[in-house]
Image (cartoon, rainbow, N blue to C red):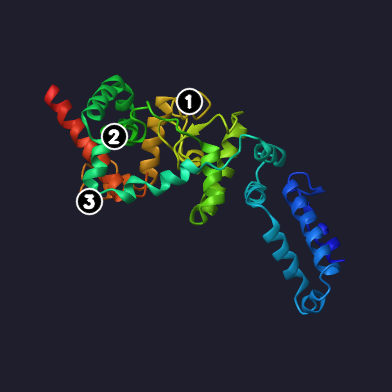
Amino acid sequence: MLAKNILQNAIVVDDRSGNKRTTQAEELTARRAIKSITYLFFKKGYMQMKINHINKLSIIFCFSFLLATDKERVLKNVIAQTESLKNPSTEYIVSVFNDPRLKEDEAILERFKKKPEKTKTYEQYKKIFINEERIVGGISFYNTHKELLSKIIKEFEIDPLILVAIVGVETNYGMKTSEFSVMNSLYTQAVKMPNRSNWATKQIAELLTFCSANNISPYDLEGSYAGAFGFGQFIPSSFNKLSIDYNKDGKKNPYEWEDVLGSIAHYLVENGYPKNDFNFSHKSKAWSGIRTYNRSDKYANVIIDLRNEISKRIFLLK
């Protein structure tokens, strides 16, 4: 009877169709629970007396939870987070999780252990991003995109060199965008990093929403070890919510500079960056707005320091 209840509880209602169904993850969990409970009740009869004193619903929950694999739990949670949306469909999500390219990447865990914002002093951190190559690259990028930057600052009224510095730090002006599979980066965090599991699961749901809507395989999208992608290194939820179609071509493109620079400007303003404010002192409103891009004091400081170095060179060249 208990085994039957578990299998019945594995049936859920699909909000999109109104039909009852079982997800692959839930059905597998239920069948494993049935097998285990059959063993416990018929091979280990002495447990029956103890079990009689425990709420049956608690037993069902515990067995389902303990017997589910990490993959099944993440899959179930991603489906739950997207149930109110037309896309991605449950079938699409299941197909992504059944893809043989899905894997845990130990290299991602190692990168988190060596995260420079956590492991380096500011002087050490600064040397990664503020050097001759990065400064000269920033000047070149500014000159190449001066017309676009002028258009953006008229609309958003923020310092264009902050935008230049951000893409300089994030992707070396678009030259370094692909290091890990975004899907596998987020999946690794979801199953291997308990403190980031809920966040990463939400980002997987956001990633699949983006990929499904744009007919992109999530395994073809590459980015950082943390799961950010594109020239501006947006995480999936930020991209879906705050990126914009600045060039009005009908889609938000994370690899097109008009959309990327417009989206970064929009992101900063939406996160409290004040218009026409050039006070970049520590804890100022502009500094705080920049900090929201990476949630790190060192990050905000290095963006401003790179911005200042590029500004000095441009001024001297005039």
Amino acid tagged 3 = His
Amino acid tagged 2 = Ala
- First along the sequence among labels 2 and 1: 2
| Circle 2 SS class | helix
Residue 10, located in which quarter of the rendered image? bottom right
Q: Residue 206's spot in the image, x, y percent?
A: 56, 42
Residue 73's tag is none
Residue 256, located in which quarter of the rendered image? top left
The nearer-to-camera label among 2 and 1 is 2
- Left or right of 94, for residue 116: left
Q: Which quadrant does the C terminus fall into?
A: top left
The nearer-to-camera label among 1 and 3 is 3
Residue 11, located in which quarter of the rendered image? bottom right
Amino acid tagged 1 = Lys
Q: Is residue 36 visible?
A: yes
- First along the sequence among labels 3 and 2: 2
Residue at x 77% of width, y 80% of height: 53
Q: Residue 219's spot in the image, x, y percent?
A: 57, 32
Q: CA distance from mark 3 to mark 2?
A: 17 Å
- First along the sequence among labels 1 and 3: 1
Q: CA distance from mark 2 to mark 1?
A: 25 Å
Q: Is residue 176 above or below residue 123?
A: above
Q: Residue furthest front?
A: 43
Q: Is residue 276 visible?
A: no
Residue picked out by circle 2? 165
Residue picked out by circle 3? 282
Neighbourhood count class around disc 1 (C-alpha, 10 Å): few under 14, some 14–19, many 20 upward: few
Between residue 102 and residue 292, name the one nearer to us. 102
- Left or right of 229, for residue 261: left
Number of numbered markers = 3
Residue picked out by circle 1? 248
